[in-house]
C-alpha cells in the first residue's frame, strides 16, 4: 500500500468521540487489520481524543497515516497539558494498546501508532 494521509478536525467536545473512534476503526479495516487490532485502534483513538480534549484545545485535529506497517494517529493538544488523574489513566491505556505512544509538548502533539499484526 502506498502511504495515505487522512485529516480530521472536530470540536473538542465529548459528543464527537464516537466519530473519531469510528473513523479510526474504518481506516484500520482499510488496512485489513485483524478484528483485535481494529478494536485496539478504536480504543486508542477514543483515549487519544479524551486526552486531547482534556488539554482544552479549540478543536481537535487528528492526522491519520496509513502504511504497510500500520496506522499512526497524531492528535493536536491544547495548552492545559497537566498530570490529572484523567490524563494518567489515558496514558496508561494508550501505552497498553499502542505500539508507539509519545507526547511532544513542544509541538503540542500526541503520537500513537498501531502496527499490523
Image: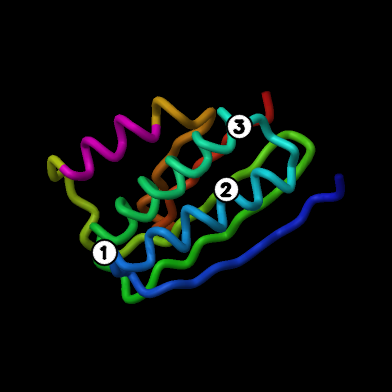
Q: Is residue 40 magenta?
A: no
Q: How many marks?
A: 3
Question: Looking at the picture, does residue 28 appear above or below residue 92?
Answer: below
Secondary structure under the numbered disc 1 in the rendered image: loop
Q: Is residue 73 left or right of residue 83?
A: right
Q: Nearer the viewer, residue 54 or 46?
A: 46
Q: Is residue 29 left or right of residue 42?
A: right
Q: Which image quarter holds the N terminus?
A: top right
Q: Report x, y in % for residue 83.
A: 17, 43
User: Label 3, label 2: how many angstroms apart (C-alpha)?
Assistant: 10 Å
Question: Looking at the picture, does residue 72 appear above or below residue 63?
Answer: above
> Which span of residues is magenta-colored?
86-94
Count residues near mark 2 (Cα–Cα under 10 Å), then give few for <14, some for 14-19, many for 20+.
many
Which mark, residue 79? 1
| Residue bearing the label numbered 2 | 25
Q: Report x, y in % for residue 60.
A: 41, 67
Amino acid at each position: 500500500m502506498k502511504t495515505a494521509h487522512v485529516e480530521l478536525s472536530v470540536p473538542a467536545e465529548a459528543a464527537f468521540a464516537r466519530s473519531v473512534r469510528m473513523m479510526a476503526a474504518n481506516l484500520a479495516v482499510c488496512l485489513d487489520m485483524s478484528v483485535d487490532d481494529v478494536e485496539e485502534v478504536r480504543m486508542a483513538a477514543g483515549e487519544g481524543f479524551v486526552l486531547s480534549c482534556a488539554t482544552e484545545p479549540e478543536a481537535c485535529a487528528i492526522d491519520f497515516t496509513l502504511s504497510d506497517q500500520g496506522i499512526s494517529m497524531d492528535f493536536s493538544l491544547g495548552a492545559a497539558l497537566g498530570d490529572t488523574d484523567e490524563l494518567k489513566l489515558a496514558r496508561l491505556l494508550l501505552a497498553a494498546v499502542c505500539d508507539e505512544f509519545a507526547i511532544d509538548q513542544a509541538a503540542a502533539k500526541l503520537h500513537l501508532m498501531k502496527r499490523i499484526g
